[in-house]
Image (spheres, rainbow, N blue to C red):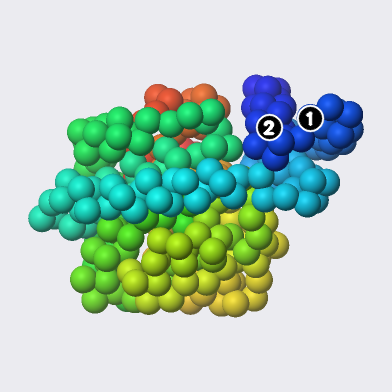
Amino acid sequence: MECLPCFFRQVSRTLSYAGVNGNRGRAITREANDIISRASLDQAPARISTLLHRLVREATGLDPYREVKDQYNRIALGMLPSVRALAGMDLLAGGVRAAIAGNIIDFGIYESIDLEGSLQESFRLPLPGRAYADFSAAVLRSSNILYLCDNAGEIVFDRILIDALRSMGKSVTASVKGVPVINDATRADAAAVALHESADRVIDNGNDGIGTLLELCSEPFLEAYRSADLIISKGQANFETLAPERDGRTFYLFKVKCPVVARWLGRKDGDIVLMGNGQLPA
């Protein structure tokens, strides 16, 4: 029940980004209400949000967040040199911090963001020692890494971590969304920020699911998923949808943006998270 207000806010916000109101907006909102009323609240919230955003996109024929995605791709690219400098000499730790900081660029949850504040916080707060040690060890023993991207703009800061992994001799495949949803990164966003200059290859997952809904993913994505030695999962929605898999190859990097997730993890809203499946609550 705690998720219901968030679902309704997402619909209202997305209609606003799409410039849809009046009778048309009310009709779409009624359809969204029907989806929410029929949905099982025992499933990951990202699964319900996927249906809501698909409804708005199909009913309007628009990518409501295209303009804000373009805006934050440009903003993040302008900040890239200074964030690289902030990451410093310890490229892996600095890359992790930069990647988590970028996760604040989430217009599925936030009305506005403080990107500079998120960067400062991410480089100030301590990385969890055991989780970072486990992550570093997993990187060292891996050769083939699948990097699950999250938001447009954020993928600029992901480049810093991907560059660090590549400098260690790792092969990195970066995956984006196959269809626009919220401000998640697509192939168009990846091209706009030159993600291909950092990753060995860029693929998409073939669907519009929020997070990573494996049952909807394309076979090429699933081949990359199955063959990876290490999976780096960015963002809270990827955490929500992949944590039930309990796959020991997966490490999650994100900012806590939800009281339900915060309570489950014993964290505070806004905390930075790096954790493997070994650190998940029972």
- Residue count near mark 1 (Cα–Cα under 10 Å), binned few <14, some 14–19, many ≥20: some
177 or 125, which lies in front? 177
- Residue denoted by label 2: 16
221 or 150, which lies in front? 150
Which tag, 1 or 2, sits closer to the chain's start?
2
Query: Where is residue 119 shown, x and y percent of the image?
Result: 28, 38
Q: Residue furthest left?
A: 89
- In the displayed structure, would residue 178 be above or below residue 27? below
127 or 131, which lies in front? 127
- In the displayed structure, would residue 45 be above or below residue 90? above
Q: Amino acid at mark 1?
A: Asn
Q: Residue at x 58, y 37 (%)?
A: 108
Separation of residues labelled 1 and 2 (CA atoms): 7 Å
- Residue denoted by label 1: 21
Query: In the rendered view, does 66 fall on the left or right side of 165?
Result: right
- Res 122 → quadrant: top left
Query: Where is residue 166 shown, x and y percent of the image?
Result: 27, 71
